[in-house]
Image (cartoon, rainbow, N blue to C red):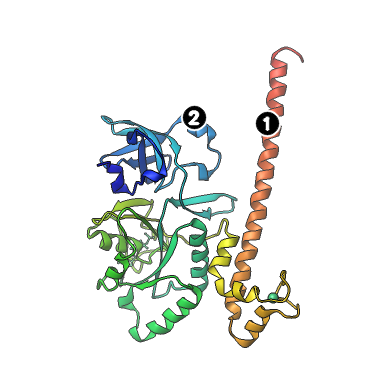
Amino acid sequence: MNKLVTLGWNENFFKTDDPAIIARVITVQRSSYRISDGEMEYLAHISGKFLNKANNPMDFPTVGDWVIVDKLKLEQKAVIHQILPRKSQLVRQAAGSKTEAQLVAANLDTIFIVSSLNDDLNIRRMERYIVAVYESGASPVIVLTKKDEYPEEQLPELISQMESVAIGIPIIVVSSVTGEGIQDLRAYLNPAETVALIGSSGVGKSTLVNVLLEQNVQKTKDIRSDDSRGRHTTTHREMFVLTNGSLLIDTPGMRELQLWDGEEAVDAAFEDVEDFASACFFKDCQHDTEPGCRVREALDSGELSQERFDSYQKLLRELAFEKRKQDQKAQLEEKNKWKQRSKNAKAAYQQRGFK
Ligand SMILES: Nc1nc2c(ncn2[C@@H]2O[C@H](COP(=O)(O)OP(=O)(O)OP(=O)(O)O)[C@@H](O)[C@H]2O)c(=O)[nH]1
Ligand SMILES: [Zn+2]
């Protein structure tokens, strides 16, 4: 049997007579990668030619990527030549002020949006995560952790609140301490499928990975007893194989999730708002003062909450702003490229002695 299958490989991804050239990225460490062919792990680097062609973060391998490689079995080293087309990819705007995409993981079937029931839970943040997941092409599942620390009687109210913003998305409540809900979660971990966990730091992602793997592979840390500096315990992204053959990727906690792209994903995540908007009299209704505005009507009657509508508009504005920044950056890069070219041409001309 082709061992790649144990990593979720499917022949439809890429046709080749030589499966030995295929591997999957299981961790990313600065400029090196750990890859696996299902049999052995290799420390891999990208080839010089690859490096020359890669000019933005999306061109580089990420955890979950399928890659074409040359393996040196004895040394357990490999060279990555190419990334196979991704079937899904989770992207966010990189932290900091630079306009730059950050690729979180690739080829995911499902994404667990993990939030703890105690103080981390935030409806507006949840909406943002849902948009990012829809945009990635994977299916979202909401996982609410630390059930053991939350008053049972308040749970139904909270879940119904969550349901109103996570339309049609499964919501699973778990406790890694008591084991409640873990079995329900396993229903979303199918053989040969890849699931990634995302969420803020300290919500219990790594603890959950350990529980699902039934062993301690990810370091966890007590957030109550540490200082504000050493909070993040998961420093890199890593893929694990569960005993049933499903693949699980843990990601470092995010302080905030800045969207990179996804106006259509906003429409998908805000199906309720879209439904009202499509019933407005004017096709291009701005839901402001236009007559026959179904959105305003829904806001007045309470069918649609003002907070939800504000959040929808805010995300759209943010994405439009993000897009303008990206376009400006692309224009600048294009300009610099031409500048450099004419500089090179001039230098070559002078070298030939035509001064
Ligand atoms: N009471 C309770 N505590 C939990 C549960 N799950 C995790 N914790 C605790 O929450 C703290 C943070 O858990 P981690 O698993 O390290 O959190 P994380 O999301 O991986 O954090 P980062 O690696 O920083 O992203 C630890 O002290 C865990 O013991 C749970 O179900 N119940
Ligand atoms: Zn309207």
Q: Residue 145 location in percent, x, y? A: 35, 71
Q: Residue at x 62, y 76 (%)?
A: 276
Q: Residue at x 65, y 59 (%)?
A: 320
Secondary structure type for disc 1 = helix
The dot on residue 340 is 1
Badge 1 or badge 2: first in the primary sequence: 2
Viewer-proximal residue, 244 or 238? 244
Question: Which quarter of the rendered picture does the C terminus lie within?
Answer: top right
- Can residue 176 be seen by looking at this rendering? no
Secondary structure type for disc 2 = helix
- Can residue 65 be seen by looking at this rendering? yes
Which residue occupies the extreme top position in the image? 353
Circle 2 Cα neighbour tier, 10 Å, few/some/many (<14 / 14–19 / ≥20) = few
Q: Residue 187 location in percent, x, y? A: 31, 66
Q: Which amino acid is tagged 2? A: Lys
Whether residue 131 sits left or right of residue 121 in the image: it is: right
Whether residue 174 sits left or right of residue 140 in the image: it is: left
Q: Residue at x 30, y 70 (%)?
A: 184
Q: Which amino acid is tagged 1? A: Gln
The residue labelled by disc 2 is: 49
Viewer-proximal residue, 177 or 278? 278
Question: Which quarter of the rendered picture does the N terminus lie within?
Answer: top left
Whether residue 11 sits left or right of residue 330 in the image: it is: left
Asked if the residues shown at circle 1 and circle 2 are in contact, with their CB atoms under 8 angstroms apart, the answer is no
Q: Give the CA separation, mark 1 to mark 2.
A: 21 Å
